[in-house]
Image: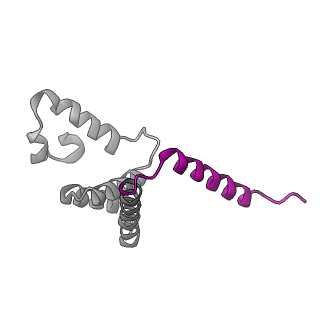
Amino acid sequence: MEGMLGQVPGWMENLAEPASEHSWGLFRDLNLGENTELSAREKALIGVGVAAATNCPFCTYFHKEEARLSGVTDDELRETVNLAADTKYFSTILHGNETDLDEFKAETDEIVEYITQQQAPADD
């Protein structure tokens, strides 16, 4: 941990001993790992969005700084937070109104099909 972060953060010392090594491994491999499908930039932006949506000031600060290390601009950070808020907003509407999931999926599939057809090159 010290080799990657330059220190053992105090909050990591709060992990229960049976889970401490496992928790560090998850954090290291998912957040800091280079052999993942997502780039460091993409992972940082996801972290910012989730942290904002869950109202976690610790994670928000960490992931914004992580994003800045990956070259993310303040405008991109603002947009990421707005997208997270938009998703949380509509999720609240969908859940609160008990929207039928199967109907929602069917409509979404129709929308995706329509957009796919619109984007397809026109036959000459």
Front residue (pair 33, 61) = 61
Dominant secondary structure of the residues highlighted in magenta in the image: helix
For the view shown, which residue lies furthest in the bottom direction?
A: 75
Residue 77, given in percent of the width and then of the height, sits at 36, 67
69 or 27, nearer to the observer: 27
Residue 56, percent from left and from top: 21, 57
Relative to 40, 7 lies left or right: left
Q: Residue furthest right?
A: 124
Q: Nearer the viewer, residue 57 or 72?
A: 57
Residue 48 falls within the magenta-colored stretch: no
| Residue 108 is a magenta residue | yes
Residue under the image location 48 percent in, 46 percent down? 101
Does residue 87 appear left or right of residue 6 in this picture?
right
Magenta segment range? Answer: 96-124
Instruction: Count the numbered circles shown.
Output: 0
Please name the residue shown 10% across and 33% down the image: 16
Is 99 in front, or is 115?
Answer: 99
